[in-house]
Amino acid sequence: MASASNCIPYSSSFSSNKSPLSDNRRKNPTVKFTCKAKNNEQRPETTSKNGGNSPVKLDRRDVLVGIGGLYRTSLAVNSMNLAKPALPDFKDCIEARQPNGTPINCCPPAIDKIEDYVPSATTIRTRMAAQSFTVDSDYYKKYSTAIQKMKNLSLTDPRNFLQQANVHCAYCDGGYTQKGNPNLLYEIHYSWLFFPWHRWFLYFFEKICQNLIDDDTFALPFWNWDAPEGMQIPPMYNSVVTSPLYDFLRNPDHLPPSVINLEWCNGDTTVPPNDQIKYNLAIMYTQMITQSKTQTDFFGSPYRAGDDITTLSGAGQIEQTPHNHVHSWTGTTVDPSNPINMGVFYSAARDPIFYAHHANIDRIWTIWLNQLKGTNITDVDWLTAYFIFYNEEAKPVRVRIQDCLDPTKLGYTYEDVPIPWLDASAKPKPRAKGKTLPSAPDPAQVFPVILDKTINVIVKRPKKSGSGSPEEILVIEGIEYDKRSYVKFNVYINEDDVNACRPDNTEFLGSFSNLPHGHRMNVKANKKFRISEVLEELGARDYDKVLVTLVPKSSPVQINGIKIEFHS
């Protein structure tokens, strides 16, 4: 296992210079509702228990639609207050910043007018696993031609490959402020916006590819890194250095036959491929099944108008692991103080493999809904939140989350491939009979603390009250860090030797991570782990206390506390 010094912090000094973005767009058109809406006029949609869409009954007397989204008066559904989705403000675009402080202009071309967009697919195309294709396949020829044509477009064309990458940069690195809250930066990571924003981004990228090669049957591939067959960089992205799908800024140590590490940190020791595959499958099981039981677990924290992203609880389980680690494993770290392309958000979409990576993230969303019986969020602030993209005709369009919940309505589905991690649960580490855990101080004696070395604490479990079986949650409280820095620390429970503990051991709960991005921004977040099943598996169901171990893997962060609480 790597020491804390193996992952080097990023630091810099920042200034914020605003550059105006021409915005002559028209106001949102008024959406008309009949006095008694018919079924096919009812919006927004919510999601039924089986993951499909079911309408909320909206009446014109209940709804007014204006600039900034949906405003409710006395909506009968759940008696909600006025809807307040967090929205981007396109009047000004701020220079983004690289982690080392260098400014970078990610602002899109000037926006004239914006039209509302609702997809209406007539055919369904299948996104296939990227490892299925070789550089002599017809598919590769189509895809490489589309990307090359995209790269050849003028930089004034928003469909240009670099301009498309800049869309991700602007949304992720503080290019916009919140609509109505100019002092707050808008952010599509580390909240419930993560999954739907990237779904829409890929949708329009795919439509642009179709347009450039005049083939509406074309579909993006997905990098199937959650199954053994896809745990290397796929051949189509790596075989020919002159290919438009190749990126020489990937980590040279992780080219094939290197097997991806879904919990990777710079400097981690390489393990035999079969072991790494086993660890990866256990990580996927833990993140998707053990730790993603609720919408907040999976999607991340709610993010509404006026919310400061620096004080939200943060990202969902999948966004942190494996999403962040696939980025950092793939991107180059030749200069750890200034990672580029996949290793950092501002440039991640400059590598064509970014789109295959996020297609798999999008596929993971469909698996969570269909195989694992999760449900989409029904909160109106999520459903009515909107983003602005450029379509295949280079026209700016406004899209809402409520219109992307069913991939078939967007015209695509995913190849049905094996999901071996569904049966790859972690197992307790063998230990000597009668061996007891080491003693450690109470959290109150330790925190707050700078996590610059391994810390052990004994955490008291709360007493249950009433009937039922509430879930126990381990909460790492008040994690303070600069989001320009790469951050990672691992968390273990009832483990007396973390150096001998592997990701397929139950004692390894997982990690907290941050991929560097954005302007100077000190963040304070919590990280939660579900531990009821873990304690059962470890034979610790009747313990009144547990040992928690935190192991830093990067630049130090401050931890303000640890506790266990119930979640019914």
Image: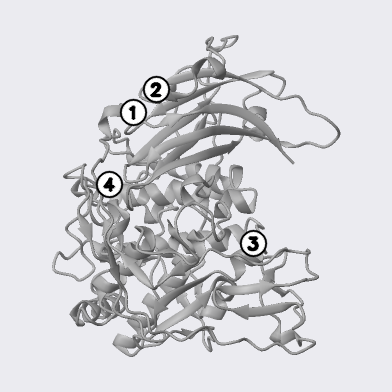
- From this viewpoint, is residue 187 visible? no
Residue on which disc 3 sits: 377
Q: CA distance from mark 1 to mark 4?
A: 17 Å
- Percent coordinates x, y for residue 438 in the rendering: 52, 10
Q: Secondary structure at mark 2?
A: helix
The amino acid pointed to by label 2 is: Asn
Q: Farthest left residue? A: 242
> Which label was assigned to residue 531?
none
Q: CA distance from mark 4 to mark 2?
A: 23 Å
The amino acid pointed to by label 3 is: Ile
Residue on which disc 1 sits: 1
**Residue in view at x 17 percent, y 44 percent:** 335
Which mark is in front, 3 or 4? 3
**Residue in view at x 33 percent, y 90 percent:** 214
Q: Secondary structure at mark 3?
A: loop
- Percent coordinates x, y for residue 346 in the rendering: 29, 58
Q: Secondary structure at mark 1?
A: loop
Tell me the crowding category of disc 2: few under 14, some 14 to 19, or many 20 or more residues within 10 angstroms, Cα based. Answer: few
Residue on which disc 4 sits: 258
- Sequence-wise, the earlier of marks 2 and 3 is 3
- Sequence-wise, the earlier of marks 3 and 4 is 4
Residue 109 sits above or below residue 329 on the image: below
Decide which of 480, 6 is in the foreground and name it. Answer: 480
The reply to whether dot 1 and dot 2 touch (C-beta < 8 Å) is: yes
